[in-house]
Image (cartoon, rainbow, N blue to C red):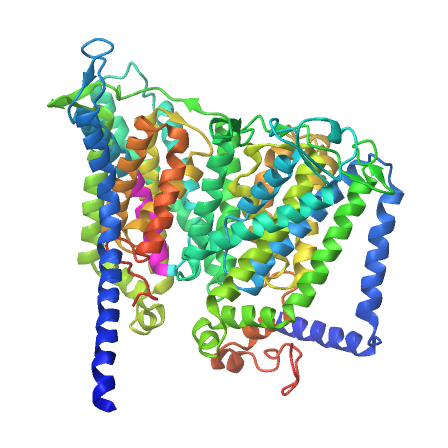
């Protein structure tokens, strides 16, 4: 009896094990395969069917990967902005497990502050390169300070009193602050998109690599994002305060017992998140040359998607997620139409969460351990 | 502060002791009577009654969302999806939108003479409820394995996807006819016709009021009955501790999907009613802000507390649609300031949310069970606040 039932049992558990292995593989590689499917499909499409090339006159079809390359370059530069915003989401979620709905609107305020600031210090289309080289970093710095301070203020007023409250309570105050900031933006710059002066001539080509044009805007956004991300990575992994942040994210009670000032650490996290959102705001204004009061809402959703895709609480994940979302967005914008982009971005988000809820690089939150 | 609170609680307990046992019922009857008489005090096209029709629709939305968020503890940020689907159900089944079809079921002239699909108003409400219930289950499936905030994100994503489809509907064809009206909207919906009442119109909005009033009463009845049913207790058990609930034999999938479906059905019916009342289904309305508006009502009132949610919905809808735009709009101007209150509507709303949440995170009328959790909590809170921590419940008393 025992001997007869044993083989079947092992066989069934073997089948189960195989099934489990398949599921695990789908969890690990399904998402990667899905993400790779986009460029492979479009690349193959370009090579086989071709795309209309205007450079050689109308009606000709070009069969190369330049178009895809352009999509990717623009996607990476746009994604760099999303990455900066996504870091703010992921830092805050990592440390107090709150979806900071006001974060996108802090970014929007950053854009508006930046534009007002550079007009105030007299930067315009006529400003010389030297003036821009001095003026824009100054504006960037002020934007970061303003948005960082704003984020700290929001945390102090809206989230800190609700530390012990039900989990949904701070979410609602976040929504409240999001509304308030949107109203501020609405009163500040009106209810429609406003064009701002194209200070850096964003459409000028910097370098051309086998037909793929890299514009000034691309250089700007990548050039601002990379140093900031490296600085942040160094701060979080090497400094004492960074260590305190990681400790608080893991276990606030234990961190408190170890003598870490938890409230101060959380404020610092909001300061950093806000400052990065402010930097993203200024870069966005120069990159898109338009601003409007609802840009923060849209950017917030995209950036949050990026943070979740990379693995929430995970800094590298947020950056990776931002870049991926940027590429997908630019590709869909150019090939299917921008009106369908939200469908693809959010559809992808759902698939990510179903296939791999912990994100590409794994989440780093308390519940994940 | 604590002394004051204790004093208030003592008074409240004293008042509650002296009231006869039938007072909640008497109160309910009085409130229903008040609701029935209310529109008679105003003209047949009164703006106030119009606001109350909207408010009651939002009460229905909020009660539906309360099933998902309050009872089952599944944070749904895409409730607008059901508003949209319910509205479109009305647009598809109660207008000449699908002009190639000729379906007329129990409709009165002029709807019975024009092409398109025309169903009786009540039938459409039922269809909208069934349709959105199915959609709710479909949206619920991917969230089953997820926890907390991820559910919020998936539902949010579904809400946005449905919005994209609503906006891009004109370019999507079924049988050669556009799916939705996009931002131009589906207009020219049939006016409901009920025997004994006649044709509903904007010239006399009282029938609309009584319709939504009846719908809200039905919703309330279902909510109250379901909350205390086996299913309702299963939701609450899942909300409190999923692992424990499942190990006690509660079917996770079915129970969660029922919550999504029932919540969605109420949202769909309310959405269909709203479409009928405004006679326009405009894709621009189906924004994330709607989901947040309804969620604020639920949280402001008190998660899971049926009466709290009703209060929260009535308060917020009236503030948003009546007090700010109509009553107090000219107040800053009267004070010599150079702006209208509607300019600040969004931020007033935002401030309200922040202030109420900071002062009263449990909501205006917290659910009794949840109140106990909040105040009883862990051992240390009992040590900190002896006496107040039991929230007026004697040890050993059965709390439902």
Location of the C terminus of chain B (image quadrant) = bottom right
Left or right relative to B150: residue B275: right
Q: Position of residue B63 (x, y in %)?
A: 64, 56
In magenta stretch: residue A269:
no
Q: Residue at x 49, y 40 (%)?
A: B162
Which quadrant holds residue A46?
top left
Above or below B217: residue B175: above
Magenta range: A82-95
Q: Residue furthest top?
A: A57
Pick whichever, A34 or A274, lies toward us.
A34
Q: Residue furthest bottom?
A: A1
Above or below B288: residue B6: below
Left or right relative to B130: residue A64: left
Pick whichever, A187 or B275, lies toward us.
B275
Q: Main secondary structure of the magenta part?
A: helix
Q: Residue at x 51, y 82 (%)?
A: B383
Pick whichever, B147 or B246, lies toward us.
B246
Q: Does the rendering let one see residue B361?
A: no
Above or below A17: residue A64: above
Left or right relative to A29: residue A91: right
In magenta stretch: residue A89:
yes
Q: Residue at x 16, y 22 (%)?
A: A63
Left or right relative to B31: residue A300: left
Q: Residue at x 64, y 58 (%)?
A: B301
Which quadrant holds residue A248?
bottom left
Q: Does the rendering let one see residue B190?
A: yes
């Amino acid at each position: 009896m025992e001997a007869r039932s044993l083989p079947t049992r092992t066989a069934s558990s073997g089948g189960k094990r195989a099934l489990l292995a398949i599921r695990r593989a789908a969890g690990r590689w399904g998402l990667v395969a899905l993400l790779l499917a986009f460029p492979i499909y479009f690349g193959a499409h370009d090579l086989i069917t071709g795309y209309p090339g205007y450079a050689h006159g109308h009606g000709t079809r070009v069969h190369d990967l330049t178009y895809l390359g352009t999509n990717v370059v623009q996607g990476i530069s746009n994604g760099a902005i999303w990455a900066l915003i996504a870091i703010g989401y992921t830092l805050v979620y990592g440390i107090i497990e709150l979806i900071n709905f006001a974060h996108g609107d802090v970014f929007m305020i950053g854009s508006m502050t930046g534009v007002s600031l550079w007009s105030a210090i007299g930067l315009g289309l006529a400003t010389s390169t030297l003036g821009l080289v001095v003026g824009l970093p100054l504006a960037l710095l002020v934007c970061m300070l303003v948005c960082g301070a704003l984020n700290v203020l929001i945390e102090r007023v809206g989230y800190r009193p609700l530390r012990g409250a039900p989990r949904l309570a701070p979410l609602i105050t976040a929504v409240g602050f999001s509304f308030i900031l949107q109203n501020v933006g609405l009163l500040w710059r009106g209810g429609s998109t406003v064009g701002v002066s194209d200070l850096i001539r964003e459409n000028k080509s910097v370098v051309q690599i086998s037909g793929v044009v890299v514009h000034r805007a691309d250089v700007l956004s990548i050039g601002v994002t990379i140093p900031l991300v490296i600085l942040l990575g160094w701060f979080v992994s090497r400094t004492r305060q960074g260590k305190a942040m990681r400790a608080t994210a893991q276990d606030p009670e234990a961190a408190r017992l170890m003598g870490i000032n938890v409230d101060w650490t959380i404020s610092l996290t909001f300061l950093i998140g806000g400052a990065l959102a402010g930097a993203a705001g200024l870069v966005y204004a120069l990159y898109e040359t338009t601003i409007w009061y609802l840009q923060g809402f849209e950017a917030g959703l995209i950036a949050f998607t990026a943070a979740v895709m990379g693995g929430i609480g995970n800094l590298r994940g947020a950056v990776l997620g931002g870049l991926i979302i940027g590429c997908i967005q630019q590709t869909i914008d150019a090939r299917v139409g921008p009106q369908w982009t939200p469908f693809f971005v959010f559809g992808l988000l759902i698939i990510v969460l179903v296939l791999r809820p912990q994100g590409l690089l794994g989440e780093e939150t308390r519940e994940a351990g | 502060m604590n002394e004051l609170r204790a004093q208030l609680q003592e008074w409240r307990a004293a008042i509650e002791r002296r009231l006869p046992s039938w007072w909640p019922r008497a109160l309910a009857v009085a409130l229903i009577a008040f609701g029935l008489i209310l529109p008679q005090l105003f003209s047949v096209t009164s703006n106030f009654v119009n606001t109350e029709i909207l408010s009651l629709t939002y009460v229905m939305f909020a009660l539906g969302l309360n099933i998902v968020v309050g009872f089952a503890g599944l944070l749904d940020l895409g409730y607008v999806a059901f508003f949209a689907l319910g509205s479109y159900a009305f647009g598809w089944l109660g207008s000449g939108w699908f002009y190639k079809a000729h379906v007329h079921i129990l409709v009165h002239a002029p709807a019975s003479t024009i092409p398109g699909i025309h169903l009786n108003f009540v039938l459409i409400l039922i269809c909208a409820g069934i349709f959105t219930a199915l959609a709710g289950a479909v949206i619920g499936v991917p969230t089953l394995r997820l926890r907390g905030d991820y559910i919020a994100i998936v539902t949010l994503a579904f809400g946005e996807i449905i919005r994209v489809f609503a906006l891009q509907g004109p370019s999507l064809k079924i049988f050669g006819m556009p799916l939705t009206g996009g931002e131009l909207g589906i207009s020219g919906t049939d006016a409901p016709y009920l025997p004994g009442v006649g044709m509903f119109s904007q010239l006399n909005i009282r029938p609309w009021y009584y319709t939504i009033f009846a719908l809200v009463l039905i919703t309330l009845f279902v909510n109250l009955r379901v909350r205390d049913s086996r299913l309702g207790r299963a939701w609450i058990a899942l909300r409190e501790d999923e692992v424990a609930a499942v190990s006690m034999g509660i079917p996770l999938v079915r129970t969660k999907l029922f919550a999504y479906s029932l919540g969605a059905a109420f949202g769909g019916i309310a959405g269909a009613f709203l479409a009928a009342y405004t006679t326009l289904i405009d894709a621009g309305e189906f924004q994330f802000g709607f989901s947040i508006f309804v969620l604020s009502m639920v949280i402001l009132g008190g998660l899971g507390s049926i009466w709290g949610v009703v209060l929260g919905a009535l308060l917020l809808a009236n503030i948003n649609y009546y007090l700010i735009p109509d009553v107090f709009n000219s107040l800053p101007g009267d004070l010599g300031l150079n702006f209208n209150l509607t300019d600040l509507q969004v931020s007033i709303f935002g401030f309200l949310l922040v202030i109420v949440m900071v002062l009263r995170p449990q909501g205006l009328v917290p659910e009794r069970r949840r109140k106990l959790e909040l105040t009883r909590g862990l051992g240390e809170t009992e040590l900190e606040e002896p006496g107040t921590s039991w929230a007026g419940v004697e040890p050993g008393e059965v709390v439902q």
